[in-house]
Amino acid sequence: MKKITDIYHTNNLDLIHSFQDACKNSDFKEYLDHLNIKEDILMKYTSTLEDSFKEYTNCKNCKNLENCKNTVQGFCYTPVLEKEMISFSYEQCQKQAKKEKEESYKKNLSLYELSEELKNATFKDIYKDDKNRLPIIKYFKEFMEQYKENLKPKGLYLNGSFGSGKTYLIASLFNEMAKRNVKSILIYYPEFLTMIKSSFQTNYKELLEEIKRIPLLLLDDIGAENVSNWSRDEILGPILQYRMENYLPTFFTSNLTIEELEKSLSITSSGVDKVKARRIIERIKQLTISLELISKNRRNHNSCETLKKS
Ligand code: ADP
Ligand code: MG
């Protein structure tokens, strides 16, 4: 019968052999050498060290983050010596750290019912092929200067054709402002209303407070919602009132002109109320200057997602 010490000895021999085998790969051996850990500790972890070596090699040959071959993109499985044991953890690579730093401004933007892609909208990517965009770009420059000087600039009521880039343009402004540490919320208004109306979202009062107070707000595609007394008088009205009183820049995009929006806001299933619609329009006029963007449709016609949410 084998004694316990023999079994221990045999297991140890196995460890030594597999370690020695692995070290025949000179690159692996070099990798271990640079870890600066004693051999008798290393040999207990041969196969895990081979895994981490693979990731280390991927990193050494890495051209860009998008093509990262590691298990967790942007992270490298790395051995760390703790007392007499090695533990392995996923360490962020330099490229990932740089990306996170560059993109940290994105936390200043919150999107509701809109594609996260809008966080990548930038001034430099705005199509310059269409002179209809020039007044908007000019307005953006003025807005940014006035905001910096604390001159309480007005927001924009941007109406125009479907797919012309209205949402993209405002998102690009909010991204630039986010880089200057100004927080914003972008809301796809029709679906947002449905979302807060749903019984699952009982906590919307808190969210409404945040929306009222956020430095920059976009109500995207206003006029495309099913107007009700509730949405007009309990949601939209109080948001606009608060923002007007506090000079908080508020942006709207719409397929409707302001006149058309007034009409749309006056009709609900409960009847016609021109006075209440007018009150909302007065607030929008106080809050914004109005520009129009008529341009070709840039949307990808195959994508329902894009159609609905951008
Ligand atoms: P709208 O809000 O006017 O209906 P969008 O802003 O959703 O139009 O733009 C339509 C599509 O074109 C989107 O997929 C958007 O990402 C893209 N797009 C619009 N303007 C630009 C731009 N200046 N640069 C790059 N992509 C754009
Ligand atoms: Mg849009």
Image (spheres, rainbow, N blue to C red):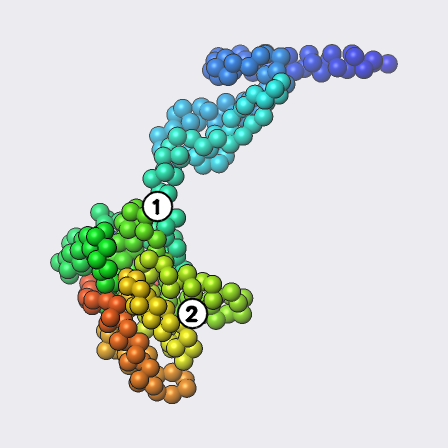
Front residue of 172 and 5: 172
Write down the residue under mark 1: 105
Q: Measured along the vertical axis of the image, is residue 247 above or below residue 281?
A: above
Q: Residue at x 34, y 56 (%)?
A: 184
| Position of residue 133 in the picture relative to residue 69 (left or right) | left
SS type, badge 2: helix
Mark 2 or 1, closer to the camera? 1
Q: Residue at x 45, y 70 (%)?
A: 194
Q: Residue at x 79, y 12 (%)?
A: 5
Q: Position of residue 13 (x, y in %)?
A: 68, 12
Quadrant holding the C terminus: bottom left
Q: Are marks 2 and 1 in contact (CB under 8 Å)?
A: no
Ligand 2 within 8 angstroms of badge 2 C-beta:
no
Residue 18 placement: quadrant? top right
CA separation in Å, label 2 and label 1: 27 Å
- Residue 193 got which mark? 2
Q: Residues within 10 Å of mark 1 (few under 14, many from 20)?
A: some
Quadrant holding the N terminus: top right
Q: Amino acid at mark 2?
A: Leu
Q: Position of residue 154 (x, y in %)?
A: 23, 63
Q: Amino acid at mark 1?
A: Tyr
View extreme (right): residue: 1
Q: Position of residue 274 (x, y in %)?
A: 30, 85
Asked if residue 151 can be seen in this view, the reply is: yes
Q: Measured along the vertical axis of the image, is residue 120 above or below residue 195?
A: above
